[in-house]
Amino acid sequence: MDKRVLCLLLCATLAFGTTHLFGRDNQALVAAGKQATLAKVFNIKNYGAIGDGVAMETEAVQRTIDACHAAGGGIVWVPAGDFQVGTIRLKSNVTLSLDYRASLLGSQNLADYPTEGLDDPREGGPRCLIYAMNATNITIEGLGVIDGRGTPEFFPRFRSGSRRERLPRPRLIRMVNCDHLTFSGVTYKRPAFWGLHLIDCRNIHFNAVTVRFRNNNFNNDGLDLDGCENVLIENYDIDSGDDAICLKSSKNACRNIVVRGCSFASNTAALKFGTSSRGGFIDVSVTNCYFYDSPMGAIKLQLVDGGRLENIDISRIVMEDVGNPIFIRLGNRGRTYTRRTSGGQGADVQPEGALIGTLKNVRISDVVAEVTIEDKAKAARATYKNFKVDNSPGMTDQEKSKSGPIMITGIPGHYVEDVVLENIKISYPGGGTQEDAERAVPEDIARYPEQFFFGVLPAWGAYIRHARNIEFKNVVMQTRTADARKKIILDDVEGFVDH
């Protein structure tokens, strides 16, 4: 059984939701492993690479990839050493295999990330360290490291002296319209912008991947999947500056995705659906995961640009040292992504024209969560912040809003529907005042949603608004200190059950 057949088997298994992947076909796995050892191997040193961490190795590595592809495919071998590269382009039937103590080091010169021949993405600029487009059967594997070295000294977010003129920063990996992708074993570090970004790709397997992006630069997302289908993510360990894993849909829906056995930490969110949400999110399962050290939230399910968000099952989650535990939002930013866009987070922003979508059939079960206030000194060290750290004594409104209750909210005339929370246990910090209990909550219909944008909420346990058929089954919530707010507030809610 060749590698392509194995990929097809993987995707078929995902489509039918089998929990014991390949359980009845171990002989096929062994046979495929033996076949892989017979693949043609192309050593980058045979094509001129040196590995001293100083020489620019882009051309040598690209020559190796091109030779492997021209020969019908095989393994591009990166032996131990430090290989400095700019943009390299992976091609069909190529396995990029990094040995233990092998490192691909991103150049710290923007000129080594040309845009010629690269597509113009719907979000962000085209520059990246590793690129692939319209390719099939690509693997990145091994025990080595891919280090973007994208620190602010070399890749600042803004031009010096300006807070408006953004400067280009390369992603670590960008793959577009590719099929049958495998990521296994490699450690990824320090992108200048987003980390691993896959757009409109299909039949993808991530296994035993490590991401270390925290406090490196701004917008250091761990894994962004935009409009991808048939994805298995397992044994993934992410500590990122921005969202750890973020499903996006600037055009097509993210569909048929399984996440299991993973650990996620982030300066912002552990798990997010949204940012772009034009196509929607359908048939997603997340189970047996650990979310920790994520001060701006753990689970964020957001649909603000149309499309459908439905059939989402999240279970067996442990959360420690997180902010807002569950945030479910249907809104009307209405972005169409027919052109590259940015901004639009102000409270006075207006809808951009796309029809309002639907958000329904969400089940979250078997969750234990500890919601905490982020340590001020730790917050001050974080690279990614949308705000200045308030060093005032006591708990500030900013801190309360980031460590608030479950929030489930649609907008007037458009409900979040059919949400079940079962076997949930959450410990909150408490500390809400009578003034907090009397606060009005803005609708912010078109504003890009972060829960803390709504400010301190008048409930400490759950705030539910513009929703229908919401069921709490064995949901236990408590505060560690006294709180003057109500436990649960319902506003324009039909069919709420708490038992």
Image (tube, rainbow, N blue to C red):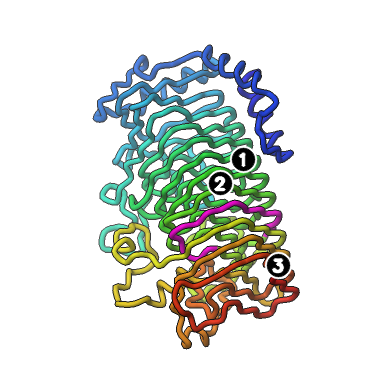
Q: Is residue 213 left or right of residue 345?
A: left
Give the mark nearer the N terminus: 2 vs 3: 2
Q: Within the magenta stretch, is there residue 301? A: no
Residue numbers of the magenta segment = 307-325
Q: Nearer the viewer, mark 3 or mark 1?
A: 3
- Residue placed most toward the observer, 412 or 315: 315
Q: Is residue 54 above or below residue 409?
A: above
Residue 408: quarter of image? bottom right
Mark 1 and mark 2 in contact? Answer it, CB < 8 Å.
yes
Which disc is residue 28 wearing? Answer: none
* Residue at the image position 43 percent from the left and 65 percent from the top: 372
Q: Is residue 107 above or below residue 365?
A: above
Which disc is residue 231 wearing? Answer: 1
Q: Amino acid type of disc 3?
A: Glu
**Quadrant of the image containing the C terminus:** bottom right
Crowding around mark 1 (Cα neighbors within 10 Å: few <14, some 14 to 19, many 20+) is many
Crowding around mark 2 (Cα neighbors within 10 Å: few <14, some 14 to 19, many 20+) is many
Mark 3 and mark 1 in contact? Answer it, CB < 8 Å.
no
* Residue at the image position 63 percent from the left and 24 percent from the top: 4
Q: Which residue is mark 3?
A: 471
Q: Which residue is mark 2?
A: 225
Q: Amino acid type of disc 2?
A: Leu
- Residue placed most toward the observer, 109 or 8: 8
Magenta stretch, main secondary structure, is: strand
Q: Secondary structure at mark 3?
A: strand
* Residue at the image position 50 percent from the left and 32 percent from the top: 184
Q: Amino acid type of disc 1?
A: Val
Give the mark nearer the N terminus: 3 vs 1: 1
